[in-house]
Image (cartoon, rainbow, N blue to C red):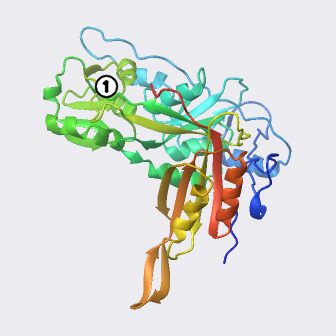
Amino acid sequence: METASISSGAYANIPTAKLNANIRFAFFKSKIKPCGSGGGKISVKYALRCALDSGDDMENIGALELQHSSAEGKENGESDFTSRDSNTLPRPLSISDLSVPVSHRSQLRVAYQGVPGAFSEAAAAKAYPNCEAVPCEQFETAFEAVELWLVDRAVLPIENSLGGSIHRNYDLLLRHRLHIVGEVQLAVHHCLLGVHGVKKEELRRVLSHPQALSQCEHTLLKLGVIREAVDDTAGAAQFVALHKLRDTGAVASARAAEIYGLDILAKDIQDVSDNVTRFLMLAREPIIPRVDRPFKTSIVFSLEEGPGILFKALAVFAMREINLTKIESRPQRKRPLRVTDGCSNGSAKYFDYLFYVDFEASMADARAQNALGHLQEFATFMRVLGSYPMDVSPSD
């Protein structure tokens, strides 16, 4: 059988117990500093070259120079959000344009996907109060911004109580080598927004993120509107305000209405009032796990095909009384199908899966170490994504 491996943060030095089966934990470090002199901008390619050329401990490259401002109020009965107002808001980072002026700041910079007013921005503020929230166009941009030292942390959604898992971010967790260092749960209250003077019965279409549209399906069906998906909720509000669309609404937050000068046509339009999104806090380095407070650990692993193999994998936690809080399967992209010759009709094809599991135990707990040591005996691949404090605070 292929030798399994476990990789994660600085868990190898945990003093409470030795890891079974020589479990090896390794962590990824990406440290970059400007290679040239003076100011100016650092491109992604230049930053990567600096990282490859340098072997010393480096200072963080500079912070993002972002202008923060609120959209102005309504004037003369009209929404006055214009392209000029749009230009004063922080411009979301894109993969093709990850460059920043060189500067040094002490304020924590936290990346999120979307534009100002997004629910992810609120989650970033809840996770890291008084941080500098940095908008990014795509989820992957936020991952890369952390890896390139453009920001210190990223806060990204992983699952919603109505819409389910955010599969894209599960895939990115495996592709990138960031560590989960915390979680935050945010109550999501969707509002139907429109330009000033418009009634909700006049709307012909509604824009929002696909998850938001699905979470408000019943309300939107009653309105009889056409639903159109866009990248994020606040971006939908920005688009409606910027183009002053009187036949188009947006599903977004009350804060987005305030920023972009829109009216709230209806509040709490989600299908279920108890609508909560769980966000992960990501960093370049792991945190040291502890046992003096509730911790959660997230792992990903793959298994050989065979009767009862998944049962055996989950039993390593049950026999040690470790509670599983989440299990998610995703087909392996590099090897999506497995061909076998063990069936009566000749060869058969099976999807080859990765399993993502969250369980309630710290990696400083000997039970967790022993469970992963046991799992390693028959897992073909294993990686610890993070061991981090559970969010036990109210979601609001």
Measuring from the top left, give residue 195's x and y in whole percent: 25, 22
The answer to which of 160 and 101 lies nearer the viewer is 160
Position above or below: 256 against 362: above
Residue 386 appearing in the image: yes
Q: Residues within 10 Å of mark 1 (few under 14, many from 20)?
A: many
Residue 332 appearing in the image: no
* Residue drawn where x is 50% and y is 66% of the image: 353
Name the residue at the top extreme. Answer: 76
371 lies left or right of 135:
right
Quadrant holding the N terminus: bottom right
The answer to which of 371 and 201 lies nearer the viewer is 371
Q: How many marks?
A: 1
Question: As shown in the figure, which amino acid type bears the numbered disc 1?
Answer: Ala
* Residue drawn where x is 33% and y is 38% of the image: 212
Measuring from the top left, give residue 382's x and y in whole percent: 64, 61
Position above or below: 50 against 6: above
372 lies left or right of 331:
right
* Residue drawn where x is 70% and y is 72% of the image: 3
Position above or below: 248 against 70: below
Measuring from the top left, give residue 46's x and y in whole percent: 70, 46
Measuring from the top left, give residue 75's x and y in whole percent: 30, 9
The answer to which of 30 and 313 lies nearer the viewer is 313
313 lies left or right of 264:
right
Mark 1 lies on residue: 241
Helix, strand, or loop for circle 1?
helix
* Residue drawn where x is 52% and y is 42% of the image: 94
